[in-house]
Image (cartoon, rainbow, N blue to C red):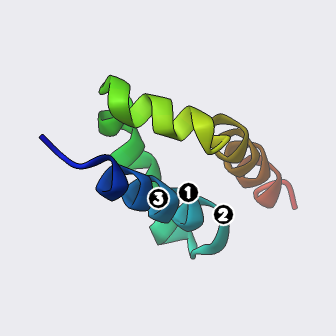
Amino acid sequence: MVHLSLLNDLTGLILWLLECSHQSGRMHAVMFLANALSFKAFLDIFDEMDGLRKLFNVVSKSGREHEV
């Protein structure tokens, strides 16, 4: 079983990629989340770190970038 500290670090890194990286980093973070969120331990940590709001912000921003 994976230690919770490792899951915390991994979740923090994924959320950082969503908010602060280039488009390719955000894309890979979303693809990772598509698989990882099916695991309860990861989902709980994601929720504690306000991940849904951060993911929603990325999705809503990406739609506006193409409206030029």
Numbered circles on residues, count: 3
From the image, which quarter does the N terminus lie in?
Answer: top left
Horizontal relation, residue 7 to residue 53: left or right? left
- Are the two marked residues, 1 and 3, in contact with CB atoms closer than 8 angstroms? yes
At horizontal 76% and vertical 46% (from top left) the residue drawn is: 57
Q: Nearer the viewer, residue 9 or 60?
A: 9
- Are the two marked residues, 1 and 2, in contact with CB atoms closer than 8 angstroms? yes
Residue that label 2 marks:
19
Q: Which disc, if any, is residue 15?
A: 1
Q: Nearer the viewer, residue 59 or 15?
A: 15
Q: Quadrant of residue 41?
A: top left
At horizontal 45% and vertical 53% (from top left) the residue drawn is: 11
Residue that label 3 marks:
14
24 w.r.t. 37: above or below:
below
Q: Secondary structure at mark 2?
A: helix
Q: Position of residue 10 (x, y in %)?
A: 38, 58
Q: Position of residue 35 (x, y in %)?
A: 30, 36
From the image, which quarter does the C terminus lie in?
Answer: bottom right
Q: Is residue 28 visible?
A: no
